[in-house]
Image (cartoon, helix red, strand yellow):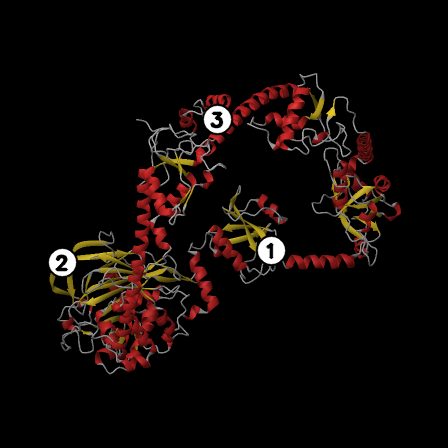
Amino acid sequence: MSRPSTRGKNKRHRQGDDGNGTVEIWRKIHNSGVVTHDDMNKLYMIWKPVCSGCRVNSKDNPNCFCALVPPPNGTRKSGLWQKMSDFLEGLGHDPNKDLRASANSPAGLTNLGATCYANSILQCLYMNQSFREGIFSVEQDVLQQQPVLDQLTRLFVQLHISKMAFIDSSPFVRTLELDNGVQQDSHEFLTLLLSLLEGCLNHSKVPKARTIVQDLFRGSVSHVTKCSQCGRDSEASSKMEDFYELELNVKGLKSLDESLDEYLTVEELNGENQYFCESCKGRVDATRSIKLRTLPKVLNFQLKRYIFLPKTTTKKKVNSAFSFPAELDMRHRMSELSEFDLVYDLSAVLIHKGTGANSGHYIAHIKDVNTGQWWEFDDEHVTNLGCHPFGEGSSNSTSKSIKNEAINGNGLNASHLQSTRLETFLSSDAYMLMYHLKHTKNVGESGSVISGARHNEREGVEVALQNGASLPFHIYDEIQNFNASYDEVCQQYSKMKEFELGRITGRRQEVRSVLAEAPVQPLEQPFYWISSEWLRQWADNIVPIPLDNSPVQCSHGKVPVSKVSSMKRLSAKAWDMLFSKYGGGPALSHDDHCLDCLIHGAKTVVSADSYRDRRDSMKSLARDILDGNCPDGKFYISRHWLQQWWKRKVLDAPSEADAGPTAAISCPHDQLLPEQAPGAKRVLIPENFWLFLYEDAKSVKPGDPLGGPTFSSDSEQCSLCSNELSEVACFEDSLRLVKQKQRQNHEKLFQAKSLPLSLNCKYFLVPSSWISKWRNYINPTLKNSDKPETLDGAIDSLLCEKHSQLLERPPELVFRRGAIIQKESSVGGLTIVSENDWKHLCEEWGGIETKGISATIDYTSNPDNVLAGPSEEMLTCKDQLGTADKMNYENGAGLIFIKTCPEVCENCIGERESCELMQKLNYSNEDICVILVRGKEVPRSMLEASKGFVETDRRVSKRARKTKNGSSISLKVSASTTLYQLKMMIWESFGVVKENQILHKGDRIIDSDNEDATLVDVNIFAGDQIIVRDSEIHENRDIADELCDDKKDLQHTEEGFRGTLLTANVSSQVV
């Protein structure tokens, strides 16, 4: 069975026209005055079937209850049926979400801005069971004396027993006086922190705590220099240096084994690098190498992923893949072969995400030695990785069978080979590796693994932490109290959540149960009428209001047929369920149909049908009138009004637009407006049409139905208005003739044709802006152009008040086709006009001929005299003259110039230009256009275009636009913007590193060596067009690195941790 169509189901029909023959029912009721039971069923649409499956609730079916609630699994944006998660948001944050997933799940640390480097190291230290037990064993009085140690202990206790999923690290960060907005190096942080803790722990009397840093992390190496001639080691070779981590190169190396080989490789000292041997008493060839003497329990490898680039004086991160084993055997790498196994297990991998050396993000993958599970620590987020450091099924792991060859201290292979299955891991972001010693029997008294047989065996003892016995009691009690109070908060929230969800679920079940009982079969009784709007709100609101049927009642207290689209038929059972719970009313049953409203409605329907029929006939007549096919007109109405009336849709009754048919043709004197007036066109209509329109207008506006007087066919036009229109027409005709005469008098000037200039002839100078405005005013194709000011006023504006001299320099002259003409200019200035044009302009525009600014074209053979004079400008070399002109000036080189009267006032012009220059040099937040050009050369056309490019008022787009030769973008700059800042903007917009940017303004290359220079210093002004070419010399890099360096420069963070407690006592060494 096909789904019923719902298209047009909510379309509003006029009363009495629903396509089911109700018009005939209304006519029958109107004629007989009798309403039968069958008429009631049809008019109130009781006969319609109960529908189901509609997408919207139908207004034309009182038996439709569809779409009042969503489908079983559906939701809405608001109200009772929105998502449960939206309801829970109103309860506030769920404190249960901040609890650990389980008792075995580690806790995270909050990122305070850029403290991920510290969080990762702190997690590595805490997950080291021996280290945290040593910290926990520190005496309380020592903690009170050492703030850093006290905060670290508190942080570790919280990580250990707090029920929170993440711990606030801000007290510890504040104690160290770290800047939480600056990214730092995690390796440097670990080195300084261990050094600081080593000094703090010296105050403890607990042996395990006092030397925990040295016992776990300290090893020793020696730098051995051996003479190739006598075979003796240098005196310094016997000195042992402590280390807390080994720094290994990564660039060009693929694995940890290769990096260790390179670290321990023997270096040849020869040539200029020869060694001075005390025994040989001279410079001899020698070898130098690093020898591992002792190894710590926790062996840290720092992978040197940051290299220095001399060309750019910046650091770059090495993102090459690097492999490292799950199990590392260091026995054969010791200076003396140990008789014990020195096998280390991978316990932590510190990872740096990102491509920049001074940016990115640190996370740590750490192994829980008690469970063997790996965890990812990403600030607040902690994720279980399973038994694999990069997650189960990760592609970062490989397993292969290898042969381990034991090598003695002299580099010779041992006599045995063994084949083992070794698992290795691959990472391009691993920054630090931590390995834990697998066999503790090889640990000496100092905690370090000693090479050879010179060691004392000592079995390690594990300390079990149960019931907080080994934790500092004062911190333990504090955290436990916090856990208890937080548990209470979580319980309160859970109860509130349970109550709210139960209330919502109960309301939803109530709505669905009532609507399930609501439908009544057609013609079935009893039933009740209920307001559709109240029913919709009741089904959608969490807290419904009392039942309200008053909007669907008529004035007789019954149910009118006109409200049937706003009501629903409700079963008696459903009505009782609603009425008993919510009260209100009134109750409108199946017997409450209003007969009075039915009789009145029948009359209205019949009247509306009659009106529509009459109006349809009148529309046909109106079309004939507008087409000029109705000669027997008796009354005038507005033609425009009639056109709009004809276009309107036929309704059941007149509307407000049907009033005022004569308003547009009535003059202010209440007489017929002449047709020459704007909008006063009229037509004659027959008397019967006039009476129909008058009745409609009177029913809408009884006080002023026509909007003006009645005009019969013999009405005369208003004489006063006719005279006024005649005067206006005469004025326009005379003005048209005046403009035409001016175009004839100044034909070449109007058409902007070049005026050939002759020597020793008199001309006049007029402001170019005034000439442009005058051309627009007399142009017949331009309507409503502004009238220019009087010529006398325009001339006065060119003279300075102090000296009554000229404030503008004369225009430039050029030679073209053997004639001297004025050079075209796009910026204001003056225009040269002939003496005849000047006389006519004075007559036409109120100018005084004697006040004009005269100009004479003159020639001189002595340019020095001209340059010394105050009134001569715009000199033109004789060599630029055409052939005919050169014949007249063969006696030597000469110059053509303009002599003005009055003279040019250089003082006032200089003051004005100084002010303009100051404005130009002090622009702020203005646009310049930057174009990126691909290729080795910039097209000549673009260089020429950028010379005088000024376009400050155009629309600016923030996105780069494609041009013919590249991409362009508008940048906001100021006069104080430095060249470096501009280059950074270009780098961010186009991705071209600042070292590769070659900037052009016109055909000039901008000197960019001094990046501290401002844009004004290099003559870049508002509206300029700058062309950028990519030299592609330097290697591309991430702009984040540069921005981070900028931030460090501003905040003086190039000093690393200087100014923090970490640099108060630096005693550790890095090898």
Q: Secondary structure at mark 3?
A: loop
Distance from Cα at disc 3 to Cα at disc 2: 95 Å
Q: From the image, which quarter does the C terminus lie in?
A: bottom left
Residue, x 48% and y 54% (percent of image)?
A: 987
Of the image marks 3 and 1, the number of the one nearer the N terminus: 3
The amino acid type of the residue labelled 2 equals: Thr
Graded by Cα atoms within 10 Å as few (under 14), some (14 to 19) or many (20 or more), the crowding at tag 2 reads few
Residue 622 in picture, x, y percent from top left: 63, 21
Image-based side of 389 in relation to 720, left or right:
left
Which mark is first along the chain, 1 or 2? 2
Nearer mark to the viewer, of 3 and 1: 3
The residue under the point 66% across, 58% down is 919
Question: What's the CA distance linking mark 3 and mark 1?
Answer: 77 Å
Image coords of residue 274 (percent x, y)? 31, 72
Question: Mark 1 is on which residue type?
Answer: Ile
Which residue was labeled with disc 1?
1020
Q: Position of residue 169 (x, y in %)?
A: 34, 68
Q: Which quarter of the figure has residue 237?
A: bottom left
- Vertical placement of 150 versus 798: above or below? below
- Using the image as rendered, state which of residue 74 and residue 423 is in the foreground: 74
Q: Which residue is mark 3?
A: 16
Which amino acid type is marked by label 3? Gly
CA distance separating discs 2 and 1:
70 Å
Q: Secondary structure at mark 1?
A: loop
Q: Which label sits on residue 420?
A: 2
State the residue in front, 650 or 796: 650
- Label 3 vs 2, first from the N-terminus: 3
